[in-house]
């Protein structure tokens, strides 16, 4: 069972969710997608990946308006998204790519509302990784190169952007236990043990 | 490590948190406290347990007012709580009893803001158990004897009371992943496997 599921990972900034997701995918021998989804979306649309990079996991306020105006469809052709803000175009492209990747087989997908996008599948395990502020600040400094005096501000701001994005596109609250199969505080375990725990979950779930 | 910790369990109504907590305590060979905290509070205060039963895990709006008026202290003597509403008297008694029980050694404590009460200890594992609405409705009918057409209403109402209680006394949001070491959807695993997962967590945490 361990490697038969689609695993989605939501994560607070600085919690190590990306590292955990990557190590988990490697240990299960299945593909891992995070920022890779931007390159795939760029390839599908013919746009520059850098344009998408700047708006990744950021919500606009235009999607509902655009939907109500019938400015695009959720079909297989992307041409109808041409008039949308780039945030929404990226979301729609990622939405379709995530569904396609899940159809192809087991994988780990980090962020991008993947739990919501795949909500109708019964082979998904949705995980949320969070951590205490000290742990996240330190990781922001050590790994993301954030300056010490700005670390807390950037952690909070990035989380707010992610929460808005998740809430805007899914209509659900980000980080509320109810939305996930399993939520883990990575600052209490560290990344390696968090991976062990997820492996244990998959084994127990599949028994 | 498995049986060296104080384990607190918050739970949605109908999620099986009580059953999971009890089975976990039995499997670890440590004491379990849930409604037992009412009897202990009644014994300490000399009041009737039935009076406390009716207000258990329900908040009043009076505690901050009472605190500001200096109507009682958080010392070891309970006499100063005499003028408080019974909800607050019970909270204060349970607060003190939970601290004392934790000092005595490893145990499982369900509900009653135990995670918040014991927040200054470093030997606590805080767990939140939730489940999807169908699972909880069915358990409310089967185990709590709730009628089918009122099940959803009672599930939602009980959760709201618990959320208010938790928020009122702890100042934190109930059911937000951030507040717990581990959150588990019991409807995806069932009670037995949820216990297995918590045991796995304790083993991995203690390695």
Image (cartoon, coloured by chain):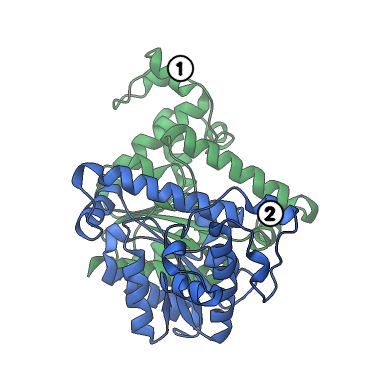
Chain colours: A green, B blue
Measuring 47% from the left and 19% from the top, which residue is drawn there? A84
Q: Is residue A105 above or below residue B89?
A: above
Mark linked to residue A115:
none
Q: Is residue A185 above or below residue B43?
A: above
Mark toward the viewer: 1 or 2: 2
Q: Quadrant of the C terminus of chain A?
A: bottom left
The disc numbered 2 marks a residue on which chain?
B
Q: Residue furthest right?
A: A149
Instruction: Provide residue B30's location: percent of width, then percent of height.
Output: 42, 85
Q: Nearer the viewer, residue B79 or A101?
A: B79
Q: Look at the image and tell me in which quarter the N terminus of chain A lies.
A: bottom left
Q: Measure the C-alpha gap from mark 1 to mark 2.
A: 49 Å
Task: State the residue position of label 1.
Answer: A65
As drawn, A198 above or below B123: above
Can residue A82 be seen at all in this image of the molecule? no
Q: Which mark is residue B66?
A: 2
Q: Nearer the viewer, residue A91 or B158?
A: B158
**Residue A169 location, x and y as percent?**
44, 33
Q: Are marks 1 and 2 in contact (CB under 8 Å)?
A: no
The picture places residue B28, in percent across and down from the top left corner, at: 38, 84
Report the residue at 77% width, 53% height from top: A147
Q: Secondary structure at mark 2?
A: helix
Chain at tag 1: A
Pointer 1 local density, CA inside 10 Å: few below 14, some 14–19, many at least 20: few
Q: Secondary structure at mark 1?
A: helix
Q: Which residue is pictured at 42% across the width and 58% down the height?
A: B54
- The image quadrant that residue A37 belongs to is top left
């Amino acid at each position: 069972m361990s490697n038969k599921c689609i695993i989605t990972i939501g994560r607070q900034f600085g919690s190590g969710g990306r590292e955990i997701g990557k190590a988990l995918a490697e240990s299960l021998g299945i593909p891992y997608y995070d920022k890779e989804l931007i390159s795939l979306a760029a390839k599908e649309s013919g746009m520059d990946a850098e344009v998408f990079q700047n708006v990744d996991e950021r919500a606009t306020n235009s999607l509902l308006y655009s939907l109500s105006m019938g400015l695009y469809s959720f079909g297989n052709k992307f041409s109808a998204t041409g008039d949308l803000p780039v945030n929404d175009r990226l979301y729609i492209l990622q939405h379709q790519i995530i569904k396609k990747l899940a159809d192809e087989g087991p994988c780990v997908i980090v962020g991008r509302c993947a739990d919501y996008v795949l909500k109708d599948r019964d082979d998904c395990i949705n995980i949320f990784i969070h951590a205490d502020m000290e742990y996240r600040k330190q990781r922001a400094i050590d790994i993301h190169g954030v300056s010490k005096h700005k670390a807390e501000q950037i952690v909070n701001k990035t989380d707010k952007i992610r929460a808005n994005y998740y809430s805007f596109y899914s209509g659900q609250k980000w980080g509320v236990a109810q939305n996930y199969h399993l939520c883990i505080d990575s600052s209490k375990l560290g990344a390696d043990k968090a991976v062990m725990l997820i492996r244990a979950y998959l084994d127990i779930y599949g028994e």
